[in-house]
Image: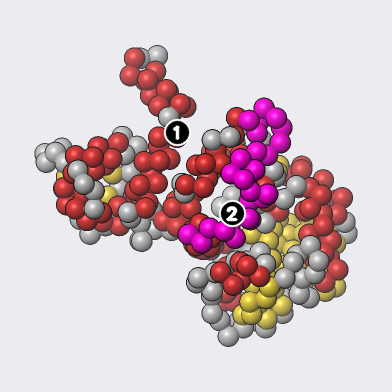
Amino acid sequence: MEYTESLELVDRFANGHILSRMFHVVMKYSICDLLEDGPKHYSEISKSIGFKDDSYCYRLMRYFVPRKLFNESETEVGVFSKTPYSTEFSMNGSLKKLGKFHCNNYHYKLAEVLPLTLEEGKNQGPSSLGLSNYWEYFEKNVPYKDEFNDGMIGYSTHILKFLKNKIDLSSFQTVVDIGGSHGFLIGSLLDSFPNVVNGINFDTEIVINSSNEKYQHPRLKHVSGDFFKSVPEADCYLLKLILHCWPDKECCEILKTISKSMKPNGKIIILDIVLNNNTKYFNFDTYLDILMIETFDSKERSLSEWIKLFEICGFKIDKYESGSPNFLIISKE
């Protein structure tokens, strides 16, 4: 292995905390947006975002050049331009809200005690910050709550790019999005499926009342409640990245609650991570698995783990499709 190549390994495996903090600054000041209308000198960028020393802005921008987030001119030192990566994290891409959510300060603080979580075999994240659970921080910190809601919009926006031609809601009259936050996913799907008479966005009261961009649609209602107790009656339910937030026991409770309200021949469409075998793991999937440990003491699941979970809860898989995104359609046995 060459000298430079070996040091690149150090950067790849040992310096992720620096990458996350640097990217946090990029997202905080929407620097990717600034390059969408053309190349700019770092001093211009620095003044736009309010840095006190232009040279520090230069070093920030330069850091991301070998990481392909920005380009630097070969003829004009200090002039930076966009890349396909930076466009994805700009207002013209679909990853801006997601990127900002995942590199926020709270997630960084949670990661500080990750070694202890792994060593002890028990979630140490929220308790290390004096919290009883993840949602307590959500309730106490309005800026984070806003970032969370924006992040969920980011997930829905990104998923919808690939989803609309993959699932068919044409045979359903009432579709409930369980844990739908702002209602963006179900609201957008209603436009594609005019036969759906009732769309319901169902989430906890604090989430429904705090979502700063609730989706508006004439066939959409926003309903608050507790999916451990009851959910609205429907013939189809959507669960986007919900079950990965809960251990198996709680997942069964959620599914059994839905089962009580599900109409005959009803379906549940689950949009979630399905871990592949060890030759096809994706970085983001395994990252989310660790994030679930540190936030909820939960996990991502392989297909065999999903099958086992459904069998315990009295469900069977009618359809499974891997790819972008993964989805499973299940019904009662």
Q: Amino acid at mark 2?
A: Tyr
Residue at image location 73% in from the left, 59% down from the top: 329
- N-terminal-most mark, 1 or 2: 1
- Neighbor class of circle 2 (other Cα within 10 Å; few <14, some 14-19, many 20+) is some
On screen, 8 above or below 134?
Answer: above
Query: Disc 1 designates what residue?
Result: 16
Q: Is residue 139 magenta-colored?
A: yes
Closest to the observer, 32 or 225: 225
Q: Main secondary structure of the magenta part?
A: helix
The percent coordinates of residue 35 (x first, y second) are 25, 54
Q: Quadrant of the C terminus?
A: bottom right
Residue at image location 87% in from the left, 56% down from the top: 314
**Residue 154 visible in image:** no
- The numbered dot on residue 137 is 2
On screen, 288 above or below 116?
Answer: below
**In the image, which residues are magenta?**
116-143
Give the tally of numbered discs: 2
Residue at image location 40% in from the left, 37% down from the top: 19
Q: CA distance from mark 1 to mark 2?
A: 24 Å
On screen, 249 above or below 219?
Answer: above
The percent coordinates of residue 30 (x first, y second) are 33, 55
For mark 1, give the secondary structure. Answer: helix
- Neighbor class of circle 1 (other Cα within 10 Å; few <14, some 14-19, many 20+) is few
For mark 2, give the secondary structure. Answer: helix
**Residue 258 visible in image:** yes
The percent coordinates of residue 1 (x first, y second) are 40, 14
Q: Amino acid at mark 1?
A: Gly
